[in-house]
């Protein structure tokens, strides 16, 4: 079921806010300084969290995965990829959360099958339609 898993050390809403920050910065500033900007954000936003570094790694790996597979997600309105920018749905970001917030850290660099991620995103879309 969509959205049943929630990482207690990195709630979904924080994930979505941090991912939104990352996507905005990527559009504004390009990709070169993103890891440093994200790391700074985590230490400013979560100064006392013992999980800040781990959550930074989870989000960073999910972002790299998304960038590497972005064109694969340009189906069924999950993402729309264009020359001047892209639109990423919260369904896709939630699907990535369901993977990257849940797996053990040694699996963060795995190249998960895009079909699996798409299935999770479509499940999330249906869940959101029926549950607001």
Image: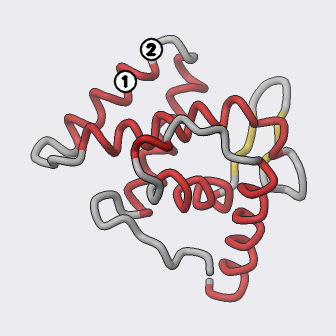
Foreground residue among 29 and 59? 59
Q: Position of residue 90 (x, y in %)?
A: 63, 58
Decide: few, some or many residues near mark 1? Use Cα within 10 Å; few <14, some 14-19, many ≥20.
Answer: few
Residue 130 horizontal/vertical position (percent):
70, 88
Residue on which the image places disc 2: 33
Question: Seen in the image, is 6 located left or right of residue 125?
Answer: left
Image location of residue 94, percent across then percent down: 58, 60
Q: What's the residue at 47%, 73% (across, down)?
A: 5
| Left or right: 90 in relation to 13 | right
Any mark on residue 84, and which? none
From what the image shows, is residue 132 above or below residue 15?
below
Compared to residue 89, the image places residue 80 above or below, namely: above
Quarter of the picture holding the N terminus: bottom right
Q: Residue at x 76, y 36 (%)?
A: 70
Marks 2/1: CA–CA distance? 6 Å
Q: Nearer the viewer, residue 124 or 84?
A: 124
Q: Which residue is mark 1?
A: 37
Q: Position of residue 31 (x, y in %)?
A: 56, 17
Label 2: few (<14), some or many (≥20) within 10 Å? few
The single residue placed furthest to the top in the displayed view is: 32
């Amino acid at each position: 079921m969509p959205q049943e898993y929630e990482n207690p050390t990195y709630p979904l809403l924080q994930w979505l806010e941090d991912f939104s920050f990352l996507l905005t910065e990527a559009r504004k500033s390009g990709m070169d300084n993103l890891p440093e900007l994200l790391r700074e954000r985590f230490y400013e936003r979560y100064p006392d969290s013992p999980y800040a570094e781990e959550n930074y790694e989870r989000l960073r790996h999910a972002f790299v995965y998304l960038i590497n597979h972005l064109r694969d997600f340009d189906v069924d309105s999950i993402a729309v990829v264009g020359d001047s920018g892209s639109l990423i749905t919260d369904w896709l970001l939630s699907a990535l959360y369901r993977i990257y917030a849940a797996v053990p850290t040694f699996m963060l660099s795995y190249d998960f099958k895009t079909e699996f991620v798409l299935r999770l995103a479509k499940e999330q879309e249906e869940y959101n339609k029926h549950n607001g």
